[in-house]
């Protein structure tokens, strides 16, 4: 049982053309159609009716706090395992600005990039009684030999995450995300669920009659990287989408603050609404990046 793709879930949470959708019988849950926030009562009802063997919580495009304790209670009530996918928010959890899935989940998986700010990779953490099965499933079940250079990069990433400064970085990510969401709202963009509690937001583009794909390409053209994304109850196909997903970890790493988010919002608006010529916006993007170089 996993979160629907257009509601914020990942393709590996049971999408029919993903391995998870092919290998398992999947039922889905989503967000409240009005608030666009997880409806835990409805999730509990679905779980009670379907009695899944495993519930997946966590998301790839959900901007609100995830209550892992409630998910743990739901899973326990129907005798299901709970797996938490914290790929997007692991850095925020380590930084102490988002609740932790421990001890509520039986299995926790995360990428090592995104908010954790490490190399491209992944980790699996589980309760001790499942460790042997997990290890065997990974090797030799799914992977070959280790990539030691990647392991070393992960070690550096984890070391940085232990530094007290990482907490400041995590707090600033959320401050920047909330400032960017508010700035976009002032420019008449609708933010899904009305705002954000974490590092990302979904921008609904239907009011300006742009698809997520077209918006992504237009923004990439001026040097702003985001991605097309479905929004709750989207009529567009996943590879087109009616929205874009925007995050602030990279901007925060460059030392940008809340005031800079107002500039970023204007650059996005100027691009998507054709307010300024493309070459002018490109120069403004370059100017902002030069002000905050990557050290």
Image: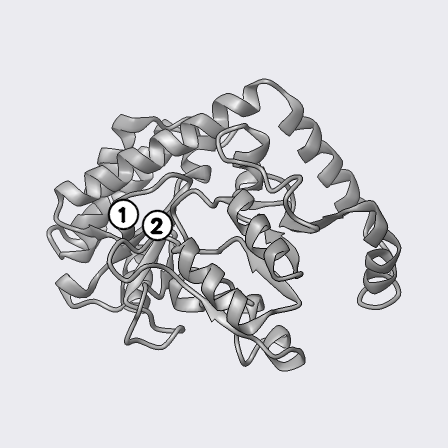
Residue 289 drawn at (x, y percent)? 37, 35
Q: How is the image coloured?
A: one colour
Q: Identify the residue shown where x is 20% and y is 38%.
A: 183
Determine which quarter of the picture holds residue 198. top left
Q: Identify the residue shown where x is 30% and y is 27%.
A: 258
Q: Which residue is mark 1?
A: 282
Determine which quarter of the picture holds residue 153. top right
Q: Secondary structure at mark 1?
A: helix
Q: Which residue occupies the foreground of this view, 62 or 151?
A: 62
N-terminal of the pair, mark 1 or mark 2, is 2
> How many numbered badges does the structure rendering display?
2
Q: Which mark is residue 227?
A: none
Residue 282 visible somewhere in the drawing: yes
Q: Which residue occupies the foreground of this view, 105 or 61?
A: 105
Q: Secondary structure at mark 2?
A: loop
Q: Which residue is mark 2?
A: 223
Residue 161 drawn at (x, y percent)? 63, 29
Residue 8 drawn at (x, y percent)? 42, 60
Above or below, 179 relative to 8: above
Q: Is residue 284 left or right of residue 248?
A: left
Q: CA distance from mark 1 to mark 2?
A: 6 Å
Q: Identify the residue shown where x is 48% and y is 32%.
A: 253
Pointer 1 local density, CA inside 10 Å: few below 14, some 14–19, many at least 20: some
Q: Tell me whether the residue at label 1 lies in contact with that at label 2, contact meaning CB atoms closer than 8 angstroms.
A: yes
Q: Quadrant of the N terminus?
A: bottom right
Q: Is residue 134 left or right of residue 228?
A: right
Residue 293 visible somewhere in the drawing: no
Above or below, 221 relative to 15: above
Residue 215 drawn at (x, y percent)? 27, 62
Q: Which residue occupies the foreground of this view, 108 or 214?
A: 108
Q: Identify the residue shown where x is 28% and y is 50%.
A: 193
Q: Is residue 277 left or right of residue 116?
A: left
């Amino acid at each position: 049982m996993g979160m629907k793709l257009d509601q914020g879930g990942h393709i590996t949470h049971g999408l029919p053309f993903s391995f998870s959708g092919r290998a398992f019988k999947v039922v889905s849950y989503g967000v409240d159609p009005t608030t666009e926030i997880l409806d835990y009562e409805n999730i509990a009802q679905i779980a009670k009716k379907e009695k899944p063997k495993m519930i997946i919580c966590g998301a790839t495009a959900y901007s609100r706090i995830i209550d892992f304790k409630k998910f743990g209670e739901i899973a326990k009530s129907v005798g299901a395992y709970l797996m938490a996918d914290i790929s997007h928010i692991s850095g925020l959890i380590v930084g102490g600005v988002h609740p932790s899935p421990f001890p509520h989940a039986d299995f926790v998986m995360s990428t090592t990039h995104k908010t954790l700010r490490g190399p491209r990779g992944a980790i699996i953490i589980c309760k001790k009684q499942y460790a042997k099965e997990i290890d065997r499933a990974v090797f030799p079940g799914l992977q070959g030999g280790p990539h030691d250079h990647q392991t070393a990069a992960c070690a550096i990433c984890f070391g940085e995450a232990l530094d007290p400064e990482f907490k400041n970085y995590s707090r600033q990510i959320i401050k920047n995300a909330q400032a960017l969401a508010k700035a976009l709202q002032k420019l008449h963009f609708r933010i899904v669920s009305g705002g954000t509690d974490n590092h990302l937001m979904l921008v609904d583009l239907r009011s300006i009659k742009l698809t997520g794909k077209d918006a992504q390409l237009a923004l990439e053209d001026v040097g702003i990287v985001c991605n097309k994304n479905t929004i709750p109850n989207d009529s567009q196909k996943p590879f087109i989408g009616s929205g874009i997903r925007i995050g602030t970890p990279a901007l925060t790493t460059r030392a940008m603050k809340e005031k800079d988010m107002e500039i970023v919002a204007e650059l996005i608006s100027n691009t998507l609404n054709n307010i300024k010529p493309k070459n002018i916006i490109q120069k403004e993007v370059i100017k902002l990046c030069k002000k905050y170089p990557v050290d």
